[in-house]
Image (spheres, coloured by chain):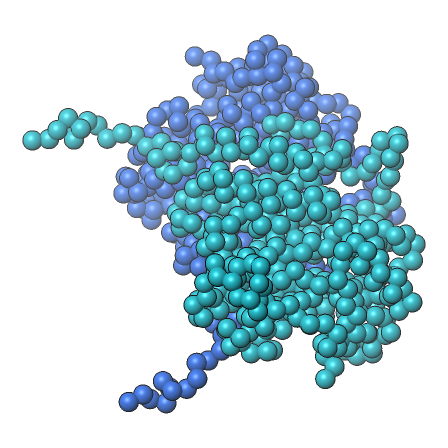
Chain colours: A blue, B cyan
Amino acid sequence: MPTSADTAPPKGLSYADSGVDLDTYERFIDTIGSVVRRTHGPRVLANEGGFAGLFRLDFNEKLFKRNFKDPVMVACCDGVGTKVKLAAQMGRFDTLGLDLVAMSINDLIVQGAEPLFFLDYIAVPKVDKAMLLDLVKGVAKGCELSGCALLGGETAEMPGVYPDGEFDMGGFAVGVVELAKATNPLRVQPGDIVLGLGSSGVHSNGYSLVRAVVDRAGLDLNAIDPELDPTRTIGEVLLTPTRIYAESIVSMLRAYKVKKVVSAMAHITGGGLAQNLERSLPSGVDAVLDRTKWEPLPVFEFLRKHGDIDADEMWRVFNMGIGYVLVVRPTFADAVARRLERTGEVVHRLGRISRGKGRVRFKR
Amino acid sequence: MPTSADTAPPKGLSYADSGVDLDTYERFIDTIGSVVRRTHGPRVLANEGGFAGLFRLDFNEKLFKRNFKDPVMVACCDGVGTKVKLAAQMGRFDTLGLDLVAMSINDLIVQGAEPLFFLDYIAVPKVDKAMLLDLVKGVAKGCELSGCALLGGETAEMPGVYPDGEFDMGGFAVGVVELAKATNPLRVQPGDIVLGLGSSGVHSNGYSLVRAVVDRAGLDLNAIDPELDPTRTIGEVLLTPTRIYAESIVSMLRAYKVKKVVSAMAHITGGGLAQNLERSLPSGVDAVLDRTKWEPLPVFEFLRKHGDIDADEMWRVFNMGIGYVLVVRPTFADAVARRLERTGEVVHRLGRISRGKGRVRFKR
């Protein structure tokens, strides 16, 4: 015999029934407000309830007037790849935001741009406030380190698209450069010096391969491997946030107001040192690099060994210890290197530019 | 006895083994180049191999000089929610790009901004060139309809994060407005007229509920329901792209160079008409709307009926036929309405502004 519950008319559908809870979502949005506002300088205009973020381009304040003559907006977009899965495996969500900002901001500064603002897209199967707050705090910290405002973002609750425990992030950065100061590969000339800035680790490329190595070798992410790092677990080493080069690069470029000392730059991501530096070379020159000039971080030998990965494949997928490259006029190479070292960079003199065909060649 | 295959040393890992094929990926990037470049006007600077997109803010060409006095950059970010799942169910990927652009661009123009450029983040478990090309073509078409450049984007191959058949998209839009011309809720005054622009359907909010209705009622997406639409399948009606209001709104705002005829605007998304319009109201006024002034599109009654959804919930989740709202100075209301109708909008006179508490009220 049916119970009263069985005979009751079926309850109508609501948005909450379908997996989306607008109330929880709105409380989360309130919570992140203060985290986000901390990144806002005087050029971010108040716009409560607004549909978009507002960022004033020029400084028109009396005391701090500075207007662009012919401003070029520079914009790019990136994610952090499957590093999200490694973070989820470890239950650590406070570092990925730094990776997200780094991936776009390091691309932006290659063009000679000064970062202005950043927006993030985070998609989750279900709002988990603690996890989302860690993600957004990481993004805000990355913005502070880059000297840009976290101007907006979207947190999308997408039940069914992402399985439980999975999520994804996309980041979007906008900067500005005076047209006359934008980098241009055509400036690169034979004799220019190639400087490389040390990476902090794997950064945010090649993580499908990293995870395949972990699986294949049956590595315990919570274990310590003394050869890799005696003070951090394997998981912590692999999750090291991507280095953000904005502060060093922007302040160095500002120091040379008139002279064009930097011919070109490159952010080393998927494709490795050769492929990314080639993007910044004109067709008439080669970059001839000497791989004995620096020692790849231990994490790369660790991955090669446990994954039995071919050496060429390593160089094609990973940064191998160099996260950012500058091509510098020879008379300024030492001064630029010293200036970058003073702002905390590890600078390697990788090689020099010669006549060629737009390729990166490694000395034997 | 082991065969020779068994005794061969295990093959080392490669990036392709881990699910990421850089070669397929690069061929796809080449393919979309021409689609993307079609959206580029003269303000997009050539930057082959570049790490970011370059967009010149001012028109400094001799014949077409136009510089901003105090430019405010306007930026926002959005996705299309679980409408991606409905598209995947139907195997139709050419419309979602329009939705993605619409969601951000319609937010942008609320601030009085002119759209400049857009970037997209698309994440898939595996590169499927035909599907990705359809997605990017849709984004490019949306950019053309919005008068903005598709300045860049990222296609992320994320095996393991997205199950087979799932994917996600995030969109980022940047525009510019003269500081003196940016909309400001404080302009709204009692007596102002509230105009509503017709939506094309559900747009891109509430799709978790839409899909729950489809599941609950066992609807066949490939069937035709004559009451809903005698010419399109249920799935096609539900997948109708979000209307982009940029062209109408930007050309109307340009027509009033000096007079501030528009007090405020709102893009009606999740939260519905009331919640979104309230974001644009100052605390001292109410918007009093008359729901008899327009007929919600048939798709909303269809969803309500099949999901047995409470009427208030319908108004809280869906746009109910009004996709965009303008609050207009009373003496200009007719002229603004006629101008919007000439650019293809269906304009409803929803009500007017009275003294109040920053709320939207519906006339009984």
Name the residue at 27% across, 29% down: B11
**Closer to us: B46 or B291:** B291
Residue B227 in percent (x, y) is at 57, 69
Location of residue A260 (image quadrant): top right
Location of residue B41 (image quadrant): top right
**Residue B101 sits above or below residue B291 on the image:** above
User: Can residue A142 be seen in this snapshot?
Assistant: no
- Residue B8 lies left or right of residue A116; in this view the side is left
**Closer to us: B272 or A162:** B272
Q: Quadrant of the N terminus of chain A?
A: bottom left
Residue B80 in percent (x, y) is at 57, 55
Name the residue at 78% across, 45% down: A57
Name the residue at 56% across, 22% down: A278
Q: Residue furthest left?
A: B1
Q: Quadrant of the C terminus of chain A?
A: top left
**Closer to us: A282 or A111:** A282
